[in-house]
Amino acid sequence: MKALVLSGTNNLFTLDCEDGSLRLCGIKGKRIKDLSGTYNSLAAGDFVELEPDPDRVDRGMILSMLPRRNVYGRFNEKGRSAQAIAANIDLVVCVSSPKLPPFRPRFVDRVAVLAEAAHVPLLIVLNKTDLGVEEEVVERLDEYRKLGYDTILVSAAAGEGIEELRGRVEGLISVFTGQSGVGKSSLLNRLDPSIERMTGEVSEKFERGKHTTTMARLYPLGAGGTKIIDTPGVRRLALRGIEPDSLVAYFPELAKLAPLCGFGLSCTHEDEEGCRIVQAVESDEIHYDRYESYLRIRTELESATGYKRSGNRDPGRKGRSGPRRPGGGTGARSSMRGIFDDDE
Ligand code: GDP
Ligand code: ZN
């Protein structure tokens, strides 16, 4: 029997089965074949083949996973492993707020990298617009739109923009992510108040006493095939599993210019004299903050993999000259330091 993975923890998965029933299932033989490699577990949105338990209508065993279209994952710093969060998705929705907590473009940049890695579009939602939106935030959202990322302004509290958001996710399987406190749960509740009830019912039935807040969960939204995968709020998104030299491919504006860089694939686009990307940062063609995010993530990926640079370049970021920032100053410093500089 075919089934859809709604959520899972400790290798027990809640499945929405072809026959209309919900089942709690383990994996036959403990491991899914074909799932070695980066993401070593089933995720919300996966389809599986299952063997129903002959004695219990709400139990069964997972036999295999059906091929995935894509996977949205993150690096679990605590567990030190790549973690599949959602599979077979159409859209990544990054929920943010202008204040309480403040807007964090560095977090958005990391989510954007994960969306690029999954090969799906990104929608940036700015919630809590009832609190007022500073000009800097409006400008950053414009900047994201120029890069090809969709953005909308909403307020779960005031009920604004909710129909627009509904329109964006209609008929799709979306994964909702965001830092804790941005109002993700409030928005989902606005989209469909029964989500809260469903959470209650599923945890009542299957997950008593488990740490249910730490996992992603899939919810059907209405009858039109719209599905939302809610993910636990996070403070910081660690990135791994990307070759430092390939990171430009995950920043659309850098990916466009990288082939024009005379230093080719071996260029780190950090301090090479005459690098096309460094030039673009200096002339403001590339937003300095986005470039800074690239550098920070690159540094993180390099230290995680013990990456060695070719040539005799300074291996650390310290003492690196870097491009001149538009408006003066040099080196890796945010142009909006103090407002947007924080990774968390
Ligand atoms: P989550 O951690 O992202 O799921 O955030 P919650 O939905 O739990 O919301 C965090 C806090 O922000 C709660 O106190 C909400 O009442 C509040 N909140 C959520 N949406 C809005 C909004 O649109 N405007 C305002 N002013 N507060 C909001
Ligand atoms: Zn370069």
Image (cartoon, rainbow, N blue to C red):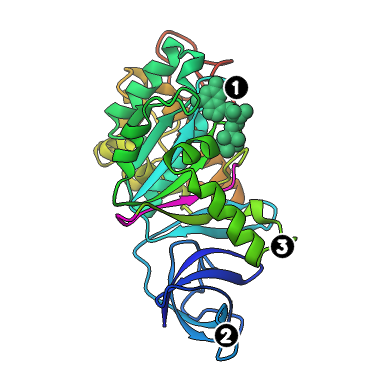
| Residue picked out by circle 3 | 208
Quarter holding the C terminus?
Answer: top right
Q: Which portion, as a residue range, is magenta?
A: 223-233
Q: Is label 1 in a helix, a strand or a loop?
A: loop
Q: Is label 3 in a helix, a strand or a loop?
A: loop
| Residue picked out by circle 1 | 100
Give percent across and percent down for residue 4: 44, 69
Q: Residue type at mark 2?
A: Lys
Residue at image x 37%, y 56%? 89
How far is the residue under mark 3 from the one under mark 1? 32 Å
**Above/below status of 180 relative to 160:** below
Which badge, 2 or 1, comes first in the chain's sequence? 2
Mark nearer the viewer, 3 or 1: 3
Outermost residue toward the right?
209
Q: Residue type at mark 1?
A: Leu
Outermost residue toward the top?
327
Which badge, 2 or 3, comes first in the chain's sequence? 2
Nearer to us in this view, 162 or 332 = 162
| Residue picked out by circle 2 | 28
| Quarter of the rendered image showing ligand 1 | top right
